[in-house]
Image (tube, rainbow, N blue to C red):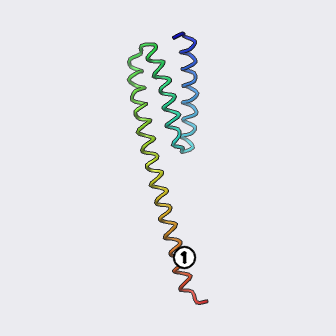
Amino acid sequence: MSPFTTTLIEWGATLLSLYGFWLCIQHRSSCFVVFLVADLGWFASAWMNSHTSLLAQQGVYILLNIVGYVMWRKDERLREELERIEARELEAAAVEEEELIPH
């Protein structure tokens, strides 16, 4: 692959990494998907240039992105379920309170 193509891949991966950090700051689980694509770009660049240490690093990053996304989504689903339970309990308490107040 030409040096120009490699440079384009690396700059694309750099921009995606920056965008991924912005999504992470915003507490968005999609940051892991963006990081995954960026790290795949870095992995491809390392592969084309025979950088074994960077290949190993990017391989670990790719795995961590997948694990991070799964765990973050699990936490989001748990939080949503707890919010639903809390809302039902608050609604039930309001109904009980209303029944105790004489009209």
Q: Position of residue 7 (x, y in %)?
A: 56, 16
Q: Specify whether 33 is left or right of 67.
A: right
Q: Position of residue 34 (x, y in %)?
A: 53, 34
**Residue at position x 43%, y 26% from top?**
58
Q: Position of residue 30 (x, y in %)?
A: 53, 40
Query: Badge 1: few (under 14), some or many (20 or more) residues near its Cα, within 10 Å?
Result: few
**In front here: 60 or 73?**
73
Going by the picture, which residue comes out furthest to the right? 103
Q: Which residue is mark 1?
A: 94
- Up the image or down, 15 lies above or below 98; here it is above
**Residue at position x 42%, y 21% from top?**
54
**Residue at position x 40%, y 25% from top?**
57
From the image, which quarter does the C terminus lie in? bottom right
For label 1, the SS is helix
Residue type at mark 1? Ala
Q: Specify whether 5 is left or right of 39.
A: right
Specify the quadrant of the image occupied by residue 55. Answer: top left
Specify the quadrant of the image occupied by residue 61. Answer: top left
**Residue at position x 46%, y 60% from top?**
82
Specify the quadrant of the image occupied by residue 64. Answer: top left
